[in-house]
Amino acid sequence: MLAQGRGERPTAQDLAQWLNGDDCPPDAVDAVCERLSPLLGYEIQPPLKLCDGVITAGDTAVSIGDLWDVYRSAVDTGEDVRWPLAPLVNAWQQRPRPVEPNRRLTDRVIPARLAMANTATNQRLLFSPAAHAEYGPDGKQLVMPGFSNADTPSPALPLALYDLGAGPTISPGRGAPLALRMFVESVLSVPMQERERGQPVAMSVSLREFLKWLYPTRTPSPAEYWPRLMAAVEALDSWDARVPLYDPQTKRSELRRVVSVGGIPRGPGALDESVRIIVDLPPGSGNGPQVSDNLRLWGVKSAPAYRLLINLAYQWHNPGVTKIPIGKGKARRWVQVDDPERYPVIKDDDLVFLTFPTMSSRAERRKPGEAWGYVRQLENAGELRVANGKILPPIRGEESNRDRR
């Protein structure tokens, strides 16, 4: 009676523990209430509880057996109803699997879709379906999911993420928003072997370790970090943080919550308590661009430099052109090409778009000279190379690519 879908089926005890605990997503509970209301003839609202086979909502209580009888009767009379517990079962079947986070600070790789090169001119990266943007007469962004010209530099993340929780603009001298850095660090922490499963994963890190993601050079006081982290967590729960994804098999688009962060501990001993992070990457997410070993530091120093490092990492990641395979069989690996001829020239307008992607129109974006200023800053720090108007990745392994702080 519990499940009609595919996959492992939960017992009533499994489902009760899932629903009554902290892991059941609110969207699933809302969907159950939406189906229960017309079936029972009155409005059902969350929260829901399940105990000994009986579902309760406020003063309403109904056993699963009786609910099944009502459902079958409605189906037999031709009513357009759906089994109300199906969303709960589906959520249970897709529950996050606990994994240990990747804690390496070097050679970190941000995920990309394995099917990134569908055609020569249409690449789908994990974040690129919302990256290709045009601007209408009113200055608002028009997102075109699934259409991204590979020859045109474009931001790697949906535009709303760049300023998530920070208002419409960011001062050039300030770091990137905490919500954006939470998002990026959470995705980077998913172990490589878990990225292609298409199932959400749950990671637990101490608050002390979590703060190091966002404040790598110091440990802030609770009075400073707690309200800011909670605001960032709230921003990650917003619709602006959802990533538009297109499934070529079902031909459906969705707005997926890729990163969810649990409550931030507070009080005595909070630094040793756990922060729970759920990352739900789409199926086929695998190896993507390698990001700077010092990305956390740049996130604190400069929002434009941080954005530029992420966006350039995707520009440099072009399998078969700027990334080539070396070796055969199990020894086969992909390496970054150093030859400048393999890389395109980035025009001033495109560089401005990569550095300041959320400006409302090209006319309002900052001058190319300012964008090139951040390029020179990153070049002096060994994060990139400039040759004949081209912006190239650093030569991996050289002293120029080490931390120069």
Image (cartoon, helix red, strand yellow):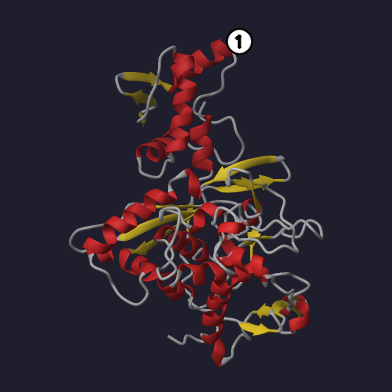
The amino acid type of the residue labelled 1 equals: Asp
Residue 401's place in the image compared with 218, above or below, is below
Q: Element type at marker 1?
A: helix
Who is closer to the viewer here, 388 or 164?
Answer: 388
Q: Residue at x 30, y 23 (%)?
A: 58
Residue at the disc numbered 1: 76
At which x and y percent is residue 393? Answer: 64, 80
Q: Quadrant of the C terminus?
A: bottom left
Who is closer to the viewer here, 356 or 282?
Answer: 356
The residue sitting at the bottom extreme is 399
The residue sitting at the right extreme is 120
At which x and y percent is residue 350? Answer: 66, 66
Q: Quadrant of residue 82?
A: top right
At which x and y percent is residue 403? Answer: 47, 85
Residue 110's place in the image compared with 51, above or below, is below
Q: Residue at x 32, y 64 (%)?
A: 207
> Can the viewer see residue 108 in this picture?
no
Q: Residue at x 55, y 46 (%)?
A: 256
Residue 294's place in the image compared with 14, above or below, is below
Q: Residue at x 56, y 41 (%)?
A: 8
The residue sitting at the left extreme is 268
Who is closer to the viewer here, 172 or 46?
Answer: 172
> Can the viewer see residue 374 in this picture?
yes
Horizontal placement of 293 versus 129: left or right?
left
Horizontal placement of 298 versus 124: left or right?
left
